[in-house]
Image (tube, rainbow, N blue to C red):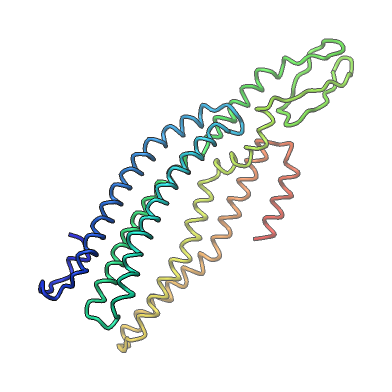
Amino acid sequence: MLGLFNNTQKDEESIPEWYLELQQSQERWFSFLEKLEAKMEEFAAAAIPELKEILQSDDDIYKRTFQRVYSGVNGQLSNIREKAKDTYDEKILNVYYNYNSQISVLSKHHNLVSDFRTFCSDRYNDFDDKYEYWRKQIEKTQERDLEIEYQKILTEYEAIKNKFNCTQCGGNIEIAKIFLIETYISCPYCKTQNTFAPSTQARNLQNIARSLAEQRTVHLYNEFETENNKERELYHQNHELSLSKIHESDKKILNEIQTKMNNIEEQRQFVIKNAPKLYQIYLRAMYDEWNKITPDLKEHNEKMYQNQLQSL
C-alpha cells in the first residue's frame, strides 16, 4: 500500500468522501510514473550503446552525425520528463489546490490533503532522480577516446613524412614534425620554398590537445577533487558537533566533543592548505602533457599556465 493510506487508522465513518479521490489520484500517479520510468530506462539503455558506436565510427572531426543523434536522444528523454511534469501539474497539484482551498487548515482532515501532496511530490522527486541518472549516462557517451584519435594522427604523419617532394627540383623533403597550419618548407637541395598543407585530421590536433592532456592527467585532478571535497565534509562534521553541545551540560561529554572538534579542525586546516598544492601538481602535469602533444604551442601554453597560477 502507498504511504498516504498506511498512516491512517481512522474509523470508516471519520474518513470524508473526498478522501477516495485522493487515494485514487495517488495510486494512478504512482502507476503512471512506474510505467514512465520503465519506458525511460528501456529507451536510454538502447540509446547508449548506439551513441557510443556512432561516436567511434564518425570520421567527421566535428562529429556532426553523432551530435544530431545525441541531440535527438536528449530531446526524447526531455519529452519523457516534460510528460511527467505536465501530469504532475494537472493531476496532482490541481487536485491538491482544489481541496486545499475548500478544507480549512483547522479541519482534522486537512493533514490528508497535505500528506497527499507530500507523498506524490516525493514520488515525483524519485522519478526526477532516475531521469538525472539516465541523462548523465547519456551525457557520458560524448566522452571520446582521444588517444585513439591521436594515434590516427601519428599514423598518418608516419605515412606521409617522407613522401613530400619539392615542386621545383623534385627532391625529397622530410616533414620533420606534425604541422598544425599551412607552412612554407625550404627544399634542402634548391632552397625553393614549398607550401605544405596539413590534412584536416592533423589540423584537428590543436583542437583535441588540451582535452587529451586532461584525460592523461585526470587521476591527478581526481586526487585534488577528493581532497577539496574533504574540507566541506569536515566543516559539516564540526558544525554538527557544535550543535550537539547546545543542550549538553555534562562537562566530560562537552570536553570529548571539543576534543573531536579540535582534531577535525586540524584536519580541515591541513586540507585547506593541501588541496591547492594538489591542484598545482595537476596543472603542471597537464600543461606538460599538452606541450608534448603540440610543442609548437608551448610558448602560448606557458603564458596560460602562468595566468592560471596567478589566479589561484
Q: In which quarter of the image is the N terminus?
A: bottom left
Q: Quadrant of the C terminus?
A: bottom right
Q: In this view, does 183 lie above or below 243?
A: above
Going 46% across and 30% down the picture, which residue do you hit?
53
Going 71% across and 36% down the picture, which residue do you hit?
295
Q: In which quarter of the image is residue 126?
A: bottom left
Name the residue at the top extreme: 170
Q: In this view, does 253 lie above or below 182?
A: below
* Nearer the observer, 118 or 192: 118
* Nearer the observer, 288 or 54: 54
Q: x%, y% of residue 171?
A: 82, 11
Q: In this view, does 64 lie above or below 175?
A: below
Going 47% across and 61% down the picture, which residue do you hit?
229
Q: In the picture provided, is 193 more to the left or to the right than 298?
A: right
Q: x%, y% of residue 88?
A: 36, 58
Q: In the picture provided, is 232 more to the left or to the right than 166?
A: left
